[in-house]
Amino acid sequence: MSAHKDSHAMQPHGGTGHDHGPNEQDVHDSLNHIVSPVIYITVAAILLVMTAVTAAVSFVDLGTFNAVVALFIACFKASIVVLFFMHVKYSSKLTKLTLFSGLFLFCVLIALTLSDYTTRAWGRW
Amino acid sequence: MARHTEVYFGLYFAMTGMHALHMIIGICILGFMIFRARAGAYTNGHVTFVNNFGLYWHFVDIVWIFLYPLLYLISRHA
């Protein structure tokens, strides 16, 4: 990590493929951003706790809401993995826009699939 | 075997099998990176490969975040 920083300081225009000076805003800052171990350990602890919570909740009979609660917890866990482990929180607006366009397309596909699934036995219940 | 059980375990082994394949690929790439790092690679600021492997590994991570409740927890009361 420190070796990377040193080489960047010594040769601001060489090697790393960044065509701007050392004082300018780096659009590829997610590649160079160093996240402190405290944040990683905190996120890992939250993920472990949420895993325990989702396992514990599954023992309670909530009917249809078992699936809703389990998937909500899974979405929360996936969000903090994407934000912190995949550095999206520290990335450019372009990266975030790309992420949300992917999520939007995913929602479209889910909506199309569910429009089939929920109407397949229409009137036969 | 009941038809429902066949469908469930068809999906179960397809999904866990695909996940295991992703993990085996990831472990192979990780081994390759350890081999390269011991030879002194990645110390000159060219860390894009390590960065991209991190993205791949956390993609595999997120897949399991969803597979675990879907395969093992959700239908407990059904």
Image (cartoon, rainbow, N blue to C red):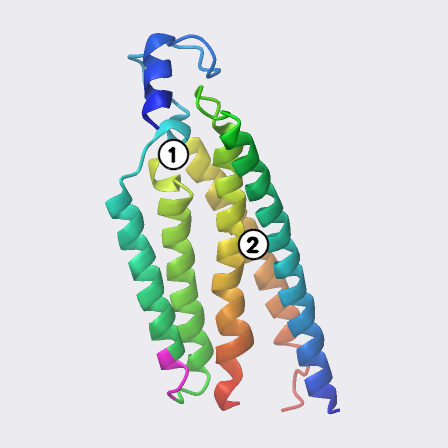
Q: Tell me residue B50's x, y (percent).
A: 50, 34
Q: Secondary structure at mark 2?
A: helix
Asked whether A80 or A35 is in front, the reply is A35
Chain of the residue where label 1 is placed in the rendered structure = A
Magenta stretch, main secondary structure, is loop
Residue drawn 49% across and 38% down?
A: A98
Residue drawn 35% across and 46% down?
A: A84
Q: Which mark is residue A106?
A: 2
**Residue range of the region highlighted in magenta in the rendering:** A56-60
> As drawn, which residue projects farthest toward the left?
A38
Residue drawn 53% across and 83% down?
A: B75
Residue B19 forms part of the magenta stretch: no
The Cα–Cα distance between marks 2 and 1, rounded to whole angstroms, is: 21 Å
Q: Quadrant of the N terminus of chain B?
A: bottom right
Dot 1 surroundings within 10 Å: few (below 14), some, or many (20 or more)? Answer: some
Q: Mark 1 belongs to which amino acid?
A: Ser
Marks 2, 1: nearer the viewer: 1
- Sequence-first tag of 2 and 1: 1
- Left or right, A125 with reference to A67: right
Q: Which mark is residue A91?
A: 1
